[in-house]
Image: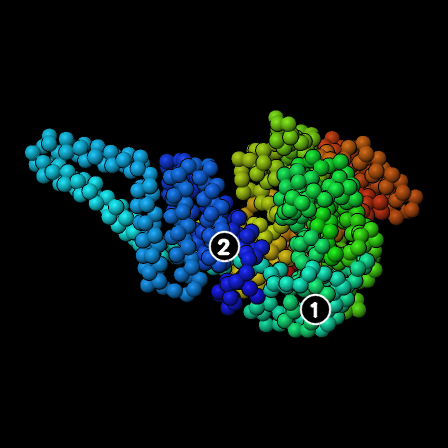
Amino acid sequence: MTGRPIADGTAERGPLRPIELAVGAVLGGATVGLVTVGSVIPFAAALNLVAAVPMGLIAQRYRLRALVTAAVAATVVTFVATGLVATTGLMATATIAGIIGTTKRRGGGFVSVLGLSTVAGLLWAGFAVGFLQLFSAGRNLLFDTVRNTSRGIQELAARQQQLEPLGRAAADVTDSVLRWWWAWIGGGVAAGMVATAVFSWFVLGSVLDRLTWLPGNDRLDAPPDDRAIAPLPVTLSGASFRYPGAVRDALREIDLTVAVGEFVAVVGHNGSGKSTLTRLLAGLPPTAGTVRRPGSAGLGHHGGTALVLQRPESQTLGVLVADDVVWGLSTELAAEVDVAALLGEVGLGGMGDKETATLSGGQQQRLAVAAALARKPALLIADEATSMIDPEGRRELVDLLAALPKRHAMAVVLVTHHEADALAADRVVHLSQGRAVERLADWPRPVRDVRRRPMGEAILELRDVRYTYNRGTPWEAAALHSVDLTVRRGEALLVVGGNGSGKSTLAWIMAGLVEPSSGRCELAGKPVTKQIGRVGLAFQHSRLQLQKQTVGAEIADWGGRATGSGAVGQALDAVGLDRSIAARSIEELSGGQAKRVVLAAIVASHPQVVVLDEPLAGLDPAGRADIVELLARLRDSGLTLIIISHDVEDMSAVCDRTVHLRAGRLLAADAVVADTASSASATLSAGTTGSSNVSDSVAATGSAAGTGLDSTTGPDSATAPHDAAAEHETRPAPPPRQEDAAWRLERGGRS
């Protein structure tokens, strides 16, 4: 492949690759920010030294042209923002970073740094002398400054007889500098460049060495294909693929053909090779077997292949919906796009002027599909595009994808681990351990886990909580309205709602990371915003919370300075992970393992409450069952769990109570009472439970009516309407079992 770093053993040719452009834009922007702040704020001048790190990373990992492109773009932006002085500093920073990064990438040493810095110093010296020679007014201003400084030193020295020699020396040096100014300035610049490079070799070089573990490869990168864009029909014959450094194939002997007009579903569990298959369809060559198509795949090009990924926000670039649809298209192609018609086709009609930041997850996925259709792709690949949205949004998105091949001359490939998503497909390909199979093994669904420890007193209370984004601006948007909620110690509470209902906003408020616009959120009687860390928060995308190089370092960082290897091992025990995983790189974790590591880190920080935002998102059935079982163990260890999810069926197996959030409001109290009463009547008529249970259920629901809570326990409430919390309080809890987290935590994590 062309255009890869030298470390990959390939030639440095061809235009900039997407990964080079993307990394250059991000790190170049970071450099601009650091240099700008360091130049404007006097006490932040040290940031100019840190600014060499982003540029150094570009030089270490990618070609020289990537560094030059990023440096030129950053220079222009810095000049507009701060002026000439900061711009010159940024150029010097890029020079030093380029010397160190390039030397590291090519395997050079100290001698290489000396040689390159000498050449760079001479070039900078020539630039400085030429600039002063060309702009005489600036040169005269500099000379006047030197004369005035020398005169001041002489006057001060004349006041003390002992200092008179100093004054005469200053006058002599000044005369020499002004007479031979080109030699002094040129030599000073060159010597400064060499000295800075030598210093940076030891300091910046060490930083770059410590950052080598950061990922920097583009797994969609493919060798250039000069053929005309024609991705369909595509035929895979015995196609296999093995990633560099791997010991076995990620995909083995796949035979598949995708033609125009087809809707093909690829179903498999995590790690089955689904994403690898999409990369082959998108143009990545196999390591064995063949992939045949009439032309190039044309990934990202007009009329080629388009990808819709799992996280739509990572593909959203425009501020407004209409802007995002045509983002990246040339002016000519953008003018040909009927944006309003495209938005109407994907179910976003009339939303062109809406800000993309205000869209729900399902709407963002629809927008990603619209942006893909704007390029008129022959092949659209949706890689786990349904995994992060609620069931209703998932059904709507699948219906949309299924209809596209009927309206356009194209094919759609949907990659998913939900069998239900594949029902509308013309053809289904099942993958297991990298191979195509007839059908997937059935995985047991989570079953109701009876709690073995009673709940305690109220620990977290929300009263009349409201939250408005961009409050006081024309773009303000209310997210929560008058939310009242009480959570008891040791309780497992499920908060259910569709995309855009305010679930994530509620999670951030309960964690103390966002202060309500009005109302109060208190933990043990004190504002939770004053107790940051006492409520742990597990993000929907677990990888965003993992910042260290290894699992052990991550958990120790969450636990604080006193967290040693023993405490790290205890935290891993609590979440059911082997202690040997502590030495593993964060980049090697699967989705389920990443979620468990985040939970282990939270356990190590000893919170009173844990809020989990969509803990089952993106996991296959086996991974979902494992996380549900883990949450049941954590609940029985005494942790208070607040689980925000749209996966009611699975999470009801572990949660004691469910509250429904709709458009920022908890379900109205009268609706809850009516629903529960009707469920009770149905249960009585069926004769499935005794009257005492039904009475207890209605009474418990009535007591929760003041806070607008739904005391049901998920979709099975019609047949089991009794209040789980009341039953748990009256029933004595059996002692924890040895395999449970409660048993381990009570013994300090020892087994």
Q: Is residue 606 above or below residue 12?
A: above
Residue bearing the label numbered 2: 66
Please say whether residue 110 is visible from this viewpoint. no
Amino acid type at circle 2 is: Ala
Q: Dividing the picture into quarters, in which one does residue 364 lie?
A: top right
Amino acid type at circle 1 is: Val
716 with respect to 220 (left or right): right
- Which image quarter is the C terminus in? bottom right
Please say whether residue 306 is visible from this viewpoint. yes
> Are the residues tagged 1 and 2 within 8 Å (C-beta)?
no
41 with respect to 695 (left or right): left
Picture coordinates of residue 335 (x, y %)? 70, 42
Residue placed most toward the observer, 193 or 402: 193
Tag on residue 595?
Answer: none
How many neighbours does mark 2 have within 10 angstroms: few (below 14), some (14-19), or many (20 or more)? many
Q: Residue at x 58, y 50 (%)?
A: 544
Residue placed most toward the observer, 12 or 110: 12
How many neighbours does mark 1 have within 10 angstroms: few (below 14), some (14-19), or many (20 or more)? many
The residues bearing labels 1 and 2 have C-alpha atoms spaced at a distance of: 31 Å
Picture coordinates of residue 377 (x, y %)? 73, 54
Q: Residue at x 59, y 53 (%)?
A: 543
- Which image quarter is the N terminus in? bottom right
- Helix, strand or loop status at disc 1: strand
Residue bearing the label numbered 1: 291
Nearer the N terminus, badge 1 or badge 2? 2
